[in-house]
Image: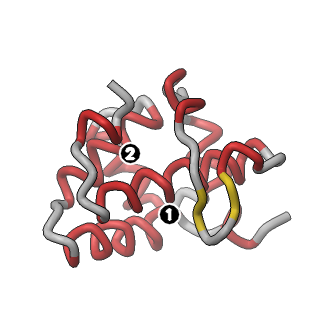
Amino acid sequence: MSRIFTTAFGAVHPLYVAKAERKGRTRAEVDEIITWLTGFDEATLRAHVEAGTTFEEFFAAADLNPAATLITGSVCGVRVQDVEDPLMRRIRYLDKLVDELAAGRPMEKILRS
């Protein structure tokens, strides 16, 4: 089992926000991506961040967006669509979305609309 599975989502969320903000994007945009992917509303997302929920628990509670399968490409040299472990694939989906946001991609493309 990967160490990221037992890492608190709330410990990584500020890193996602910082990455986006360095590129001129906002916390609200990061949270919009996360809520789109997971089906959580803003209050539920905030509760997970504050509660110390692990990535494993976070994605177990999520209702993954059916359009998430349209997320393709590489994160850290790994093609997200080729990741075998379902939990790791979901984490990579989130990483990829944050990367796209930081790269300046338009929100409607990031959200696969």
Mark earlier in primary sequence (1, 2) = 2
Count of numbered labels shown in the rendering: 2
Place of residue 97 in the rendered image (x, y in percent of width and height, measured from the top left): 42, 51
Which amino acid, mark 2?
Answer: Ile
Which amino acid, mark 1?
Answer: Gly
Which residue corresponds to mark 1?
52
Q: Residues within 10 Å of mark 2 (few under 14, many from 20)?
A: many
Q: Residue at x 30, y 56 (%)?
A: 101
Q: Which element carries disc 1, helix, strand or loop? A: loop
Q: Residue at x 69, y 62 (%)?
A: 78
Q: In the image, 48: left or right of 110?
A: right
Which residue corresponds to mark 2?
34
As drawn, 27 above or below 73: below
Task: Determine the image quadrant of residue 6.
Answer: bottom right
Place of residue 100 in the rendered image (x, y in percent of width and height, measured from the top left): 37, 55
Say which of 60 and 2 sits in front. Answer: 2
Q: Residues within 10 Å of mark 1 (few under 14, many from 20)?
A: some
Q: In the image, 96: left or right of 45?
A: right
Which quadrant of the rendered structure holds the C terminus?
A: top left
As drawn, 11 above or below 71: below
Q: CA distance from mark 1 to mark 2?
A: 16 Å
Q: Residue at x 60, y 53 (%)?
A: 91
Q: In the image, 99: left or right of 87?
A: left
Disc 1 and disc 2 in contact, CB within 8 angstroms: no
Q: Residue at x 38, y 30 (%)?
A: 112
Which quadrant of the rendered structure holds the N terminus?
A: bottom right
As drawn, 39 above or below 5: above
Residue 22, numbered circle:
none
